Image (cartoon, rainbow, N blue to C red):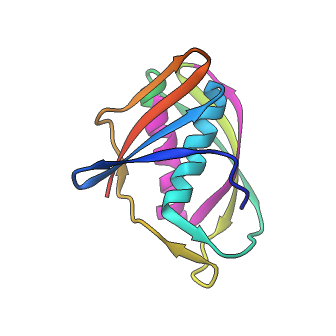
Amino acid sequence: MERDFSYTLLSHTADLGMIVKGDSCEGLFRNAGMALTDIMILSKGPMPGVKKEISIKGNDLPDLMVKWLSEILYLFEGEHLITTEIVVNQLSRSSISSTLITGDFDSRYHEVLREIKAVTYHQVDVREDSGIWTARIIFDL
């Protein structure tokens, strides 16, 4: 899986925090979704891709970020699907429509690095400063 996004992990009591950046709001949401997968799963082989169309509504960008990442977490925890690519088709301050390429989790090729229970609202932040978008997200482990 090619990695063209960056993120920073934050030390947080009993939880795990992450700061993600993007050059646009769409890029930020894409990078956050890919970073979530990256901190959960180590992939050791190619996966066939299956498209999943995902649309989420929220009250504002921080709420939307939590709900968006919670959906990606659900795909892994509930459907055993690993997100390998994300295309943000439409994004506003209260909704996101995206296409995710997913593959089935297979213990022969994938290793769980961290078990994340939930994406939390604790200290969640999404903001733009001088053209750089940044999100702070805390995960319950």
> Which residues are drawn in magenta?
64-92
Is 53 drawn above or below residue 42 in the view shown? above
The answer to if 75 sits in the magenta stretch is: yes
Identify the residue shown where x is 52% and y is 61%: 76
Q: Picture quarter containing residue 97?
A: top right
The answer to whether residue 80 is seen in the rendering is no
Q: Residue 13, how many percent across, how many down?
A: 22, 51
Q: Residue 56, located in which quarter of the rendered image? A: top right
Question: Is 18 rendered above or below residue 29?
Answer: below
Q: Nearer the viewer, residue 75 or 33?
A: 33
92 relative to 49, above or below: above
Residue that appears at 41% across and 65% down: 114
Vertical placement of residue 31 versus 117, above or below: above
Identified at 57% across, 69% down, the residue is 42
In terms of depth relative to the viewer, which is nearer, 68 or 32? 32
Q: Is residue 129 magenta?
A: no
Direction top: furthest residue: 130
Q: 80 and 41: which one is in front?
A: 41
Location of the N terminus by quadrant is bottom right
Residue 115 visible? The answer is: yes
Indicate left or right for 139 with 36 as reference. left
Quadrant the C terminus occupies: bottom left
Image position, residue 93 (x, y; %) = 54, 19
Image location of residue 111, percent across then percent down:
53, 75
Residue 34 location (% of width, % of height)? 60, 49
